[in-house]
Image (cartoon, grey):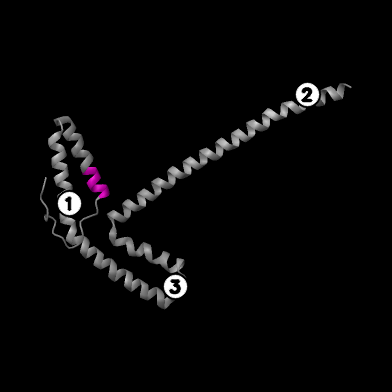
Amino acid sequence: MNEKTNAGLIAPLLAPRRWLRIFSLSLIFLSGSVVGAVSGGFWMRNRMISMIQHPEKVPDRVLPRLRSGLSLSDVQARTVEEIVRRRHAQMESLRAETYPKQLAEFKAMQSEVAEVLTPEQRSKWSALSDSVEQRYLPVRPVGLPPDDVTIR
């Protein structure tokens, strides 16, 4: 009779522990998902920034993926490489034409915003906009003279 009493007391104690385990595992899974999503976002952002800052490296990054992803033969791979490099050079040429206009617009925005700000805000704005320019605007295309836009 004593064994029956103990058996009845043990079963109810296991139920709260099971929910605690489920809750703990769910919390661990959720935490891992959040960390993975945030890490993946930073990784993707850094890759995009790298591609913006170094457009000359884009074909070298794209071609191996095309070759493996499309299972290209050697002949196809050479032909696709020639096409990608030729078209990328054309895109860079177009970018060289529009870059001065983009930069002029960015500099005009910098000036207009600075006019609205106090001197303290203006110094912070200058640092912030310079950082954005260096990090997110494409680099000056090859072939442009260094002093093509002198707005500031």
**Quadrant showing the C terminus:** top left
Counting residues from the start of the chain, the first of labels 3 and 1 encountered is 3
Q: Residues within 10 Å of mark 2 (few under 14, many from 20)?
A: few
Residue at x-position 46% and y-position 67%: 68
Give the structural element (helix, strand or loop) at label 1: helix
Q: Residue furthest bottom?
A: 75
Give the structural element (helix, strand or loop) at label 3: loop
Report the disc number at residue 72.
3
Nearest the eye: 102 or 75 = 102
Residue 135 is one of the magenta-drawn residues: yes
Where residue 53 sits in the image (x, y, percent)? 28, 54
Q: Which residues are magenta?
A: 130-136
Counting residues from the start of the chain, the first of labels 2 and 1 encountered is 2
Q: Residue furthest right?
A: 1
Residue at x-position 15% and y-position 46%: 107
Q: Residues within 10 Å of mark 3 (few under 14, many from 20)?
A: some
Q: Which residue is mark 1?
A: 103
**Quadrant showing the N terminus:** top right
Report the disc number at residue 9.
2
Q: What amino acid is labelled 3 in the image? A: Leu
Q: What amino acid is labelled 2 in the image? A: Leu
Where residue 41 sits in the image (x, y, percent)? 40, 46
Residue at x-position 20% and y-position 35%: 124
Residue at x-position 48% and y-position 40%: 34
Q: Is residue 7 left or right of residue 135?
A: right
Where residue 43 sits in the image (x, y, percent)? 40, 48
Q: CA distance from mark 2 to mark 1?
A: 76 Å
Q: CA distance from mark 3 to mark 2?
A: 68 Å
- Numbered disc total: 3
